[in-house]
Image (spheres, grey):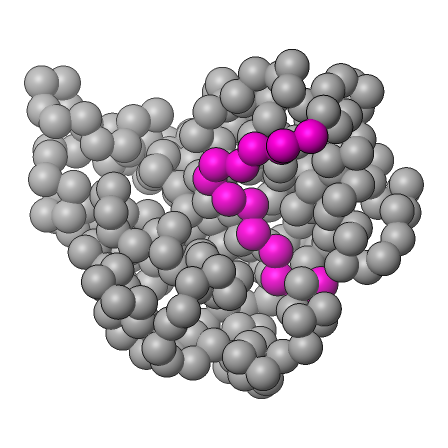
Amino acid sequence: MGLMQITNLSVEHRLSDVSMSLKKGEMLGLIGPNGAGKSTLLAAISGLVDYQGRIEFSGEDLAFMDTTQRARSIALQPQFAQSAWALSVHDVVSMGRLPWGDSDQEIIQQAMQQAGVLELARRPVGELSGGEKARVWLARVLANQPRVLLADEPVANLDMAHQQQAMQGLQQYTRAGNTVVVAIHDLALAAQYCDRLCLLDQGQCLLTDGIEQVLTRSRLEAVFKTSLHIDLKATPPQVQAYAGTQAAIKR
């Protein structure tokens, strides 16, 4: 039994009978084409959408967990987030401490450092680029120090250097004994940083297993509908569409 057990999780028209176990100290990557159900699964785990089935955290049904305890234990970095106020980066990251009722500056500074936004601390969020904002939202979630961190496309708007930094920060977070579940389109990054992968397609979990077991050419080509070159022995791993085919996941 893992830290979190998901059993027969369904969301109307979006997910169907998804079951998996989330382990302490691992990063699980959610992969699959657009509309596969990755964001919906993260939203269900975080309590943002109604679902059928059962989600247990440390043996306790999330449906009956105290809301404050749940907010401290599980946190979501959404794919799209906006600040309605003229807040500084420091202020936004500090909001990650709201479930704990404090503003622990050491934790906040560490979170900004991990997300690569420490030098932006005094900047108004509204003046930042899309990639910089994405790193700020990641820092806010890290400041909460949840035992389960859910990240929905945390590297989508980042350049390659900051993609590496963000994934390294999430990997470091798991090595401290936490669990990270990340929805990610870049299969090469997923192969490089994730411990296990869950392949979703049309709202169903086709397979949850190790990198080499999930990232097979026949399986991925059937799901993504394109020809792929896969070399998991390369450093870093390579997963890319052949030139002239429909673009899939490139690195």
Res. 131 image quadrant: top right
Viewer-proximal residue among 55 and 124: 124
Viewer-proximal residue among 173 and 129: 129
Identify the residue at horizontal 41%, vertical 47% (top origin): 183
* Image height of 40 relative to 226, above or below: below
Identify the residue at horizontal 53%, vertical 79% (top origin): 63
Identify the residue at horizontal 54%, vertical 36% (top origin): 81
Is residue 77 inside the magenta stretch? yes
Res. 68 image quadrant: bottom right
- On screen, residue 61 versus residue 209, left or right, reads right
Is residue 153 inside the magenta stretch? no
Total numbered labels placed on residues in the image: 0
- On screen, residue 73 versus residue 160, left or right, reads right
Res. 120 image quadrant: top right
Picture coordinates of residue 15, whole percent (x, y): 27, 64
Instruction: Examine the rendering and report whether any part of residue 195 can be seen.
Output: no
Q: Quadrant where the C terminus lies? A: top left
* Image height of 32 relative to 113, above or below: below
Picture coordinates of residue 146, whole percent (x, y): 68, 58
Picture coordinates of residue 7, whole percent (x, y): 38, 79
* Image height of 59 relative to 233, above or below: below
Viewer-proximal residue among 220 and 121: 121
* Image height of 56 relative to 161, above or below: below
Identify the residue at horizontal 52%, vertical 62% (top origin): 46
- On screen, residue 241 versus residue 104, left or right, reads left
Picture coordinates of residue 23, whole percent (x, y): 54, 68
Instruction: Examine the rendering and report whether any part of residue 157 can be seen.
Output: yes
Residues shaded magenta: 72-85
